[in-house]
Amino acid sequence: MLKIENLSKSFDGVYALTDVSLMLPSKGLFALIGESGSGKSTLLKCIGLMLAPDCGKILFDGKEISSLKAAARDKARGRIFTYIAQETVLPEDMTVEEGLALFEKDRQKRLMALDKVGMRGKAEEKARNLSGGERQRVAIARALLRDTPVVLCDEITSSLDDDNADAVMKAVSELSKDRLVLCVGHKVGELLAVADGVVELDGGKVVKNTVSPDSSESRKGNAKISLGFKDAVKLFFCTFRTKAARTVFAVLFVFIAMASFMLSTTLLIKDDTDVMRANAKNQGIILLSMSNKDIATAYSVGRNSGMVNGWLIYADLDNGDFALYEGDYPKNGKDVMIPLFMHRYDPDRYRVGMQINLDGKNIYTVCGIFETDTSAYDFEELKKEESYLYSVNATLFSYYASMDFYDEYRDSVSYVLTKENERVIRYNDEQIIAGKAPEENNQVLISTGSVAQKYGVSENEVVASADLYFERVQKSVVLAGEKYSVSGICFSSYNGWLKKCDVSELASTLRYLAPVDDITAEDYKDVYNSSKLDNYSAQREEMTKISLILFAVFAVLAFFVFVNTNLFEKDERKTLFGSLREAGFTARSLTLYFVFSQAFTLLCSFVLLLAVGIPTIIKFQTVKEALCYTEYMYVFSWWSVLAALGAMLLVAAAAYAVTAIKSYKEISACSK
């Protein structure tokens, strides 16, 4: 039973309803009549919780529903009432049955409802092709499916011809057999012919009431009040054509913003060191020479090969970094390997089995070829521009011996001539005859042969008076530009100084090498003085600024397009969403439409990013260098993809937060 107590409603100080009280039974068809402006539609919408009264109460089965908070009132409205307007709006691009599927998933029930209102034959018809009377009958079928205990009809036959009006009223009359139906109409005669009772209004007051109330409880309906995600998806594509242009612009703006942010993030994440390492690996380089001796001495050592360019490099060849392409690894100190680069450059000359004199006295045999990436090179152009060959890196045109046989080499080279034409010799536990052995790197010994030559005496005399000669020897000396202290005299016929060190610290033709991943951009610049790397760095800095500006501009544009896409246009407020609200869906559930619209935009933009943005950014990270090989100007980071997606999710979330309250209010107002 529905009870209205002392209900009043005003608009701008003018009362449309004044102290209205009614008791309506749980079933039956009742007419609400009166002159235009008497308050009929206002009373109907107050009863249906679409308008809040100024004062008074509305009770359903003894429970007050008019004073509920907004969300609870919205749910109660959907569960108790179905509202049928003067002009029923349906999802225009859906069939009749598809539109009803928003309210009932069971197809048989949908067809039965259409059958009851004589519309089964139109089940597959697009809603846009229906007449006014057919639309009203579909609305009644919708009310049957929603199964609410109260149906409110507002001037539902006012725009119909007599035949359609009779058919609609017949369907409404059938509907009232097991629920309460309250009809507002201006065709009083036809309404009174089927009504079980009449309520007449005049000037906002009840002047006639023939309704006989009962105390029975209303039917327990099972109305669907929430729009599901799948339904939101259907609605989005149903209404897509009304906002296709805005959606396309949103996708493009989001795509450009994401691509710009991804590029700027890539440029910020990957620095000079990453670019240097990527270029080295792109060119097939495994080892790089470096200036940091403290690090380098722990790795590979290279010395002049006796050729115009290139070295003989002693390296740990079987550590996994040197994958075998052909042949085998060195088995003795005279076996060497070559990079695949050399073999590809001249396969007939540089091959397994070739022999070569590298240091003027030893014959080495190429026992194997190890893999290097040669995809960056155009070898035909390389041969034409051979002057560029060694600007790549000498290690690509070098011979590699095993570190296992480095001791053999160590014994073959033991000194270097300083600028003063004096020898610095490796101290190898020679006998100390005065002073003490060197304990620090900045200490050296002087040989008996060097003392004898310096003072014009024999070595035997030096040995016999070693302490006396040590007192006479200068205790500080500069060798190869570095200052050393003399710690003692040792027995040796060499004319020079002795230093406790590895031969790699003495031989003037040695280079220190380390794996690419262990060398920084600063180490690289120290050795190569690479102005090219500095140029790339400057270009990346400029690109970062531009991409961040683009991101800011298009993120703002995307934000406003998101907002614009979220808010209803006037026709939408009057049509689809108004119809769904009037039919009983809660405002909160209808906001799923906005969530999906933004998710769809982001998804399209992300697909475009994967298909176009990422390949383009990866493509333009390389530049052609000297006709011979390609280099990276920047290095793409896959982390930047996640960063770009995260940034746009924040933009979308901000747009949704800004519009959530307003859109909720607009949806709530759709049926007012």
Image: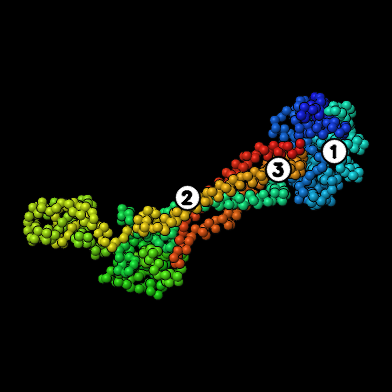
Nearer to the camera, 458 or 83: 458
Residue under numbered circle 2 = 268
**Image location (x, y in percent) of residue 448:** 12, 58
- Mark 3 surroundings within 10 Å by alpha-carbon count, few (fewer than 14), some (14 through 19), many (20 or more): some
> Pointers 2 and 1 in contact (CB under 8 A)?
no
Q: Quadrant of the C terminus?
A: top right
User: Of the residues shown, which amino acid type is indicated by label 1?
Assistant: Glu
User: With 82 as the anchor, is 361 left or right in this view?
Assistant: left
User: With 307 as the anchor, is 556 left or right in this view?
Assistant: right
Q: Quadrant of the N terminus?
A: top right
| Residue depicted at x 26% and y 71% | 361
> Pointers 1 and 3 in contact (CB under 8 A)?
no
Cα gap from disc 2 to disc 3, whole angstroms: 40 Å
Element class at badge 3: loop
Q: Is residue 490 above or below residue 555?
A: below
User: Of the residues shown, which amino acid type is indicated by label 3?
Assistant: Phe
Cα gap from disc 1 to disc 3, whole angstroms: 26 Å
Earlier residue among tags 2 and 1: 1
User: Of the residues shown, which amino acid type is indicated by label 2?
Assistant: Leu
Q: For marks 2 and 1, give the one nearer the viewer.
A: 2
Q: Is residue 375 above or below residue 544?
A: below
| Residue depicted at x 27% and y 70% | 360
- Mark 1 surroundings within 10 Å by alpha-carbon count, few (fewer than 14), some (14 through 19), many (20 or more): some
**Image location (x, y in percent) of residue 14:** 79, 28
Residue under numbered circle 3 = 568
| Residue depicted at x 79% and y 38% | 83
Earlier residue among tags 1 and 3: 1
Cα gap from disc 2 to disc 1, whole angstroms: 65 Å
**Residue 622 numbered tag:** none
**Residue 155 numbered tag:** 1
